[in-house]
Image (cartoon, rainbow, N blue to C red):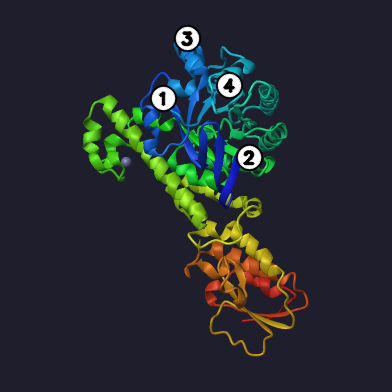
Amino acid sequence: MPDVFEIVDKDLLGRIGRLYTPHGVVETPTVMPVINPNLRLIEPSEMRKYGAQMLITNAYIIYRSERLRQAALSGGLHALLGFDGPVMTDSGSFQLSVYGSVEVENAGIVAFERDIGADIGVPLDIPTPPDVPYARAREELEITLARMAEAKAYAGEMLLAGPVQGSTYLDLREEAARRACEIGFDVYPLGAVVPLMEAYRYADLVDVIVRSKRGMVPDGVVHLFGAGHPMMLALAVALGCDLFDSAAYALYAKDGRYMTVDGTYHVSQLQHLPCSCPVCSGHSAKEIAETDEAARTRLIAEHNLYVTFAELRLIKQSIIDGDLMEHVERRCRSHPRMLEGLQRMMDHSPFIERFDRASKSTFFYLGPESARRPEVLQYSRQVENIEVIGKALIATRRDADTAGFDRVFGVKMPFGVFPPELNETYPVGHAEVTDDFGCEARDLTLGRVLAFLKPHPDAAFTFAFDPKWESPVIDEIAKAAQVKKLF
Ligand SMILES: [Zn+2]
């Protein structure tokens, strides 16, 4: 039997993987549409049409209904839903977080998930919300971890998810991930992140994901529980999330909310539909807004699914092409709070760089955040090891006189020192940058030039710069012991 998860391609912390389940192989990253067993807006058997490979439903809702429970126990979960692909079940943790209590024990619900034939089951963990007192987050984490260990005895052949909790305490998230991996699970859901997304706290979300990843085994399958808006999928995939679930496609549709990769519109405000899916090609905005509620909900839910899976396909293509970072940067410019998420992601570049692939197709400079990409950090280390002996020229000016120097270096924004022999290599040789850069990117670039001088104490540098590079960092470069001349 192969491992449960196989990584076939990667970019940043994102990856395309194969998840092996009892009901077939799933290509990740993917979104699992949430099926409410009582209220099927779109039939599970139709879900493949939109791009879904795997579904998620709630074992607790099935358990609590006599009719559904008996049907699931006698015929199995897949027959109940009318879907022969992989199905994950949640345990009632969500109901626990909303209502404060549930009428089931951990061992009982895990055994039930197993008995109805769920492909992946979840223990009854405690989703600790953001910003609670530390002592509560710690206490609930210990209960969750004890229940996770207990669940192992009841899972049987079912794949088991080990939720990572810890509220907004990053040390707890990292510890929770590490201890979950020590117990050993097939999927690691990051729990209780929905309140962060609802409040547009994308920077905090980035921290929670990255710190959880730090504690986790690198090939652990990560499920960002409750996340499924197409706007934020690229960011989450780039940070290493493999599975998502979306109740939002249906919940949004009920309120007339129409998803796009740039955010959400209310369908009554739309005069034009910015999408070419079968729903939007076949209807005008006016038709959708004016039809009866049931039909409108159904149409918007279908569109929401189409747009979500279209975005996932684009993300997967970006991973294959090695331009996921460019894709994330574009998406994160859809909202100021998403931009904060991107900036926070760049704070984590030293960690991301350790896992990133060495060579990609492109490096497009798309804004000051591009100057802090993991590839730039990797490059800085690479050039620091270049041997420099004798007289060396570092020139931002193309007309600088190079006569009499043993080595000549250019300067390329945002990388810093640019040896001509790297002209054909990634990233510096392939980078498409702007000549009209701002002071933030300029100073970061010059800071990298300064850092390049330090490992070369015996070389004598001359620094020739163009007036547009004028900066306080130039003064620091002028003071460096290795710099003999500056003009
Ligand atoms: Zn559409």
Q: Which label's residue is closer to the chain start, 3 or 4?
A: 3
Element type at mark 4: helix
Residue 475 appears left or right of 249: right
Q: How far apart are marks 4 and 2 (CA)?
A: 20 Å
Residue type, label 4: Arg
Q: Distance between the residues labelled 3 and 1?
A: 19 Å
- Is 30 above or below relative to 43? below
Q: How far apart are marks 3 and 4 (CA)?
A: 18 Å
Residue 88 appears left or right of 125: left
Callout 3 crowding tier (Cα within 10 Å): few <14, some 14–19, many ≥20: few
Residue type, label 1: Gly
Quadrant in which the N terminus appears: top right
Query: Where does label 2 land, which residue?
Result: 3
- Residue 162 location (% of width, % of height): 63, 30
Disc number at residue 114?
4
Residue ID at (64%, 43%): 219
**The residue at label 4 has a CB less than 8 Å from ligand 1:** no
